[in-house]
Amino acid sequence: MANRSYLYACNVVPLKSSTPDSLRIKGITEYNYGVPAITTAFIGAKFIKFTQSTIWEDPDAVCTVSDFKSGYDLYIEYATKMADLKLNDFNHDELSRQKQFLERNKARFAIGELGELAVMDARSSDGWKEINKIVQKMTKVVINDANYMRKAVRLKDQKFIKFVNKFRDRFQMDVYLSNILYYS
């Protein structure tokens, strides 16, 4: 297990009978041991529901379904401010590359897979019942963090810089965008 969060794009909500091939999911990013800013924005901007996981074979595993466009808009707004202020080595060239990649891979829904991270925190032998509870708690934190992002982009530059410095570990910008992910 790689202990990553995953972000995918697709045009249909996964169902128990869905397979990654039938969904035509597109990989967006994966991140080790955490949830980066892009995944936070896409999951948290307009969360819709939990549904059957797209990567776990266990029928009880869940993933998040969110509105792709809302996540895109929030992330680009946040990333633009990061690039404007040249924070954390994030610049307009990287922003442009990310925008092009996301535009090429836009879809109706963003699918967030947090199960691997939840497995790290599982303590009992309840299996997916416990893991799904952890995923649901993690999702609440991600939604809350997306709300912080939404408020942060409206801050004046100096206050935004303080926000970024204070929450540097929770809003990582160094992401690898690719259609080829561990579970693609």
Image (tube, rainbow, N blue to C red):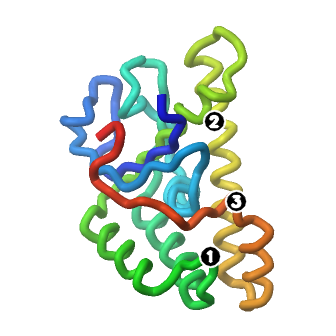
Tell me which label, 1 or 3, sits earlier in the chain.
Answer: 1
Residue matched to label 2: 136
Tag 1: Cα neighbours inside 10 Å, few (<14), some, or many (≥20)? some
Q: Position of residue 117 (x, y in %)?
A: 59, 35
Label 2, secondary structure: give it: helix
> Tag on residue 175?
none
Question: Tag count in the figure?
Answer: 3
In this rendering, the label closer to the viewer, 3 or 2: 3
As drawn, which residue projects farthest toward the top?
125
Residue matched to label 3: 169
Label 3, secondary structure: give it: loop
Residue matched to label 1: 88
As drawn, which residue projects farthest toward the front?
89
Q: Position of residue 182 (x, y in %)?
A: 35, 40
Task: Tell me the CA gap for discs 3 and 2.
Answer: 21 Å
The reply to whether dot 1 and dot 3 touch (C-beta < 8 Å) is no
Task: Inspect the image, locate mark 1, and give the three-letter code of the amino acid beneath it.
Answer: Asn
Q: Is residue 179 left or right of residue 44?
A: left
Residue drawn at point x = 19 percent, y = 35 percent: 22
In this rendering, the label closer to the viewer, 2 or 1: 1
